[in-house]
Image (spheres, rainbow, N blue to C red):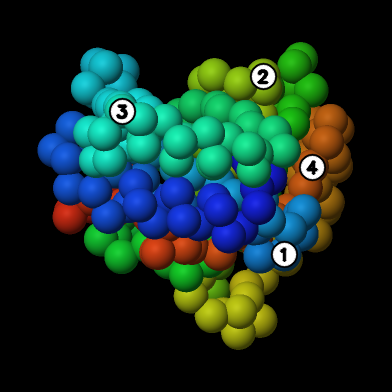
Amino acid sequence: MKALTVALYGSVSLGLASLAAAQAPHWLAYQVGAGGPGFTYTVALSFSKWAEVDEWSSVAQILSKAYGEAEGAKVLQSGRNTIERSETAVYRLLPDLSTRPQVSDAPAAHLQLFVTDVEPAMVPTWEGYLARLKAAQEKTPQAPTSIRRVVALGASNRYVTAVPFNKYAERDGWPSALDVLREAYGEAEARALNETRLRCTREARIVVLAYRPDLSRPATGAMPASR
């Protein structure tokens, strides 16, 4: 995530998003809408094979091609001057643990992220819990799509569940995880599974991201989701 000054970052990103260089990567840009620090941005690039990353142009290369070396360097530096801090990570899709994953050409207006840092010794137990939760959610029509990933590069044992939605009103119909488990397995088993979740969790947080189409360069078709 990056904590940036909106105006300057926006001008740089809009310039990048407008470029049509064939070698430029595609990305989706999001801004924290609730549950986290303001003016924090996430830029997500999807790929299926590591070899694809070798074909990506750097931001410096894209700017240099668009504006020339000297002007491109100025634009790049102006963007860097607004960055408080930056962090990169790679997340691997967990299709077998995701609930009704859907691939759409049009990104949802919002993403709710459940970020869970799992105790290292409890990783197999955690994934077992997710499997039981997925099975319960798929029996519950009201349960929303939940796309789950685990970090491949970055903070170890971090799991992220992304729930897309377009209107905040949709959230009113979402059942809680405990309610879903209770309906599928009964009160006693649901509470036992919830205790398992708590034992596995080292730290957890929830944040809602707002999609920024003006700062994005989406692919023309559905983007790969393996990473």
In the rendered image, the quadrant that contains the C terminus is top left
Q: Residue at x 28, y 40 (%)?
A: 67
The location of residue 5, given as percent across then percent down, is 66, 52
Mark 2 is on which residue type? Ser
Q: Is residue 140 visible?
A: no
Give the CA distance from mark 4 to mark 2: 14 Å
Mark carried by residue 69: 3
Determine whether 189 is above or below 104 in the image. above
Which comes before the other along the chain, label 2 or label 1?
Answer: 1
Instruction: Identify the residue at the far front of this view.
Output: 70
In the rendered structure, the answer to whether residue 205 lies left or right of residue 156 reads right
Which comes before the other along the chain, label 4 or label 2?
Answer: 2
Give the CA distance from mark 3 to mark 4: 44 Å
Q: Which label sits in the foreground, 2 or 3? A: 3
In the rendered structure, the answer to whether residue 47 lies left or right of residue 141 reads left
Give the CA distance from mark 2 to mark 3: 38 Å
Q: Residue at x 56, y 53 (%)?
A: 8
The location of residue 79, given as percent across then percent down, is 54, 41
Density class for disc 4 (Cα within 10 Å; few <14, some 14-19, many ≥20) is some
Q: Is residue 50 visible?
A: yes
Mark 1 is on which residue type? Ala
Residue with the mark numbered 2: 156
Instruction: Check if mark 4's residue and mark 1's residue have beta carbons within 8 Å.
Output: no
Mark carried by residue 34: 1
Residue with the mark numbered 4: 204
Instruction: Check if mark 3's residue and mark 1's residue have beta carbons within 8 Å.
Output: no
